[in-house]
Image: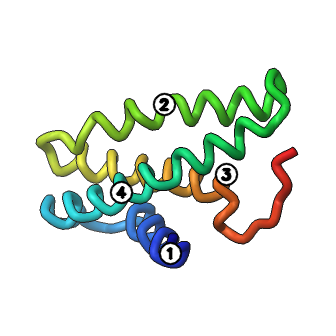
Amino acid sequence: MDVDEIKATITKALTERSALPPYEDLCALHQDLVRHIEALTPLAAKRVDRLWRGSVEWYQKRRRLDTVPHEVGRGLGPGLQSAAWHVKSLGYTLRFLLENADLAGTGEDAH
């Protein structure tokens, strides 16, 4: 996996803008986000499941992981504002997955 490409996608999704980008740009970014999210979700789930089950950390991360399929399945919606908001939300989700898949180079131990 290209971590730099994933980080660049996150940056694009979370960049504050004074004007909304064209819907076509949001569609392309959405496709990139979904592709990365689908690749990282199993890795993050594996790492989270190594945590002590029942701990607050495990519960919070597991709950977040369980919402990913629903969030991805929602799609962009018809409006520019909702599409921009959804892309930003997926950017935060991708960042969470990258951090918890331990591909970001954090070196943190999940035990």
Q: Amino acid at mark 2?
A: Thr
Q: Residues within 10 Å of mark 3 (few under 14, many from 20)?
A: many
Disc 2 target residue: 67
**Contact between labelled residues 3 and 4, with CB atoms less than 8 Å apart:** no
Disc 4 target residue: 35
Specify whether 6 is left or right of 71.
Answer: right
Alpha carbon distance from label 4 to label 2: 16 Å
Q: Amino acid at mark 4?
A: Arg
Alpha carbon distance from label 4 to label 3: 17 Å
Disc 3 target residue: 100
Disc 1 target residue: 2
Alpha carbon distance from label 1 to label 2: 24 Å
**Residue at image point 32% right, 62% down:** 32
**Contact between labelled residues 3 and 1, with CB atoms less than 8 Å apart:** no
Q: Earlier in the sequence, mark 1 or mark 3?
A: 1
Q: Secondary structure at mark 4?
A: helix
Q: Earlier in the sequence, mark 4 or mark 2?
A: 4
Q: Amino acid at mark 1?
A: Asp
Q: Secondary structure at mark 3?
A: helix
Badge nearest the viewer, 4 or 2: 4
Which of 49/81 is in front?
49
Which of 80/107 is in front?
107
Alpha carbon distance from label 4 to label 1: 12 Å
**Residue at image point 56% right, 36% down:** 65
Badge nearest the viewer, 1 or 2: 1
Q: Residues within 10 Å of mark 4 (few under 14, many from 20)?
A: few
Q: Amino acid at mark 3?
A: Asn
Residue 85 spot, x, y in % from top left: 33, 47
Quarter of the image where the C terminus is located: top right
